[in-house]
Image (cartoon, grey):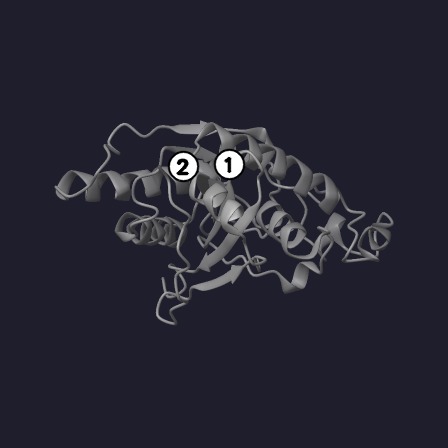
Amino acid sequence: MSKSPEPRNSTTNSEETQWLVEQPAQNTQNTQKAQNSQYTTVHLVRHGEVFNPDHVLYERLPGFHLSERGFRMAHETGRYMARNKSMKNPAAVFSSPLDRTIDTATAIIEEITRKSNSDTSTEHDSTNLAIKTDERIIEARNEFRGKRIGHGEGALWKNGNWRLVLNLWRPSWGESYKEIAARVQDFVFEKVDEFAGKSIIVVSHESPIWSFRHMLETGHPEHNMLLRKTALASVTSFTFEVGTHKLVSIEYADPAANVE
């Protein structure tokens, strides 16, 4: 029988914060129902730094892998997850189909597997983890793909580009936040039920992760892109009740913050 996840206190050293949904007082019947509930945790990880010397907006373009620092970031996050009781035994690992997220997911699996092989106390076998890709967690569509923002064809004064960035809350430069959040929610809720009572790791991108989180916290996905809190190689963990998809908690950690 799965138990309701217990809140963890935020810790400054791990850059971890927590947001909890306030729950109303429960009567005896509701308490019994809660005890019989199952919970699934989805760890949404943003990819590490990308090798992009020309500073183009790579969006969904192929060939953009992690930089050397990006790989170090991904491995640091992987080691953090391998040490974390709620993360070290994922039932599955999913990734956006893009190179940078697959690189990140690969590094995380390597670290979890390494720790699992050396830790006799590990309850589950993590040595056979494989990456499964899903289009619903891919990067947001962007009309500036392949361009340097503010330079050449990406200059805001050329080709009417300025019209695309008039409103940072409702992007006219590509996929809307509503569309992004909807596809991520569809994926997450499906996996919450599929992996009932377990946890999974999902490697995605800044916009999909934050749009989904903002929708859960505020009721709408629209936000100012300059105010996101989704650092490279960071982990945002969502715990839901199976079946009802009721949100229990959101936790955030930035394990690779000090990687150079």
Residue 30 in sight here: yes
Find residue 97 and report its horizontal and vertical position in percent. Answer: 51, 31
Q: Residue at x 36, y 33 (%)?
A: 91
Q: Quadrant of residue 229?
A: bottom right
Of 235 and 56, which appears nearest the observer? Answer: 235
Image quarter of the N terminus? top left
Q: Are marks 1 and 2 in contact (CB under 8 Å)?
A: yes
Residue furthest to the bottom in view is: 12
Q: Dot 2: within a 10 Å radius of its alpha carbon, few (fewer than 14), some, or many (20 or more) residues?
A: many
Residue 248 falls left or right of residue 211? left
Q: Earlier in the sequence, mark 1 or mark 2?
A: 2
Of 230 and 217, which appears nearest the observer? Answer: 217
Q: Label 1, on which residue?
A: 242
Q: Residue at x 74, y 50 (%)?
A: 154
Q: Label 2, on which residue?
A: 197
Residue 141 in sight here: no
Residue 194 falls left or right of residue 12? right
Of 208 and 161, which appears nearest the observer? Answer: 208
Q: Amino acid at mark 1?
A: Val
Q: CA distance from mark 1 to mark 2?
A: 8 Å
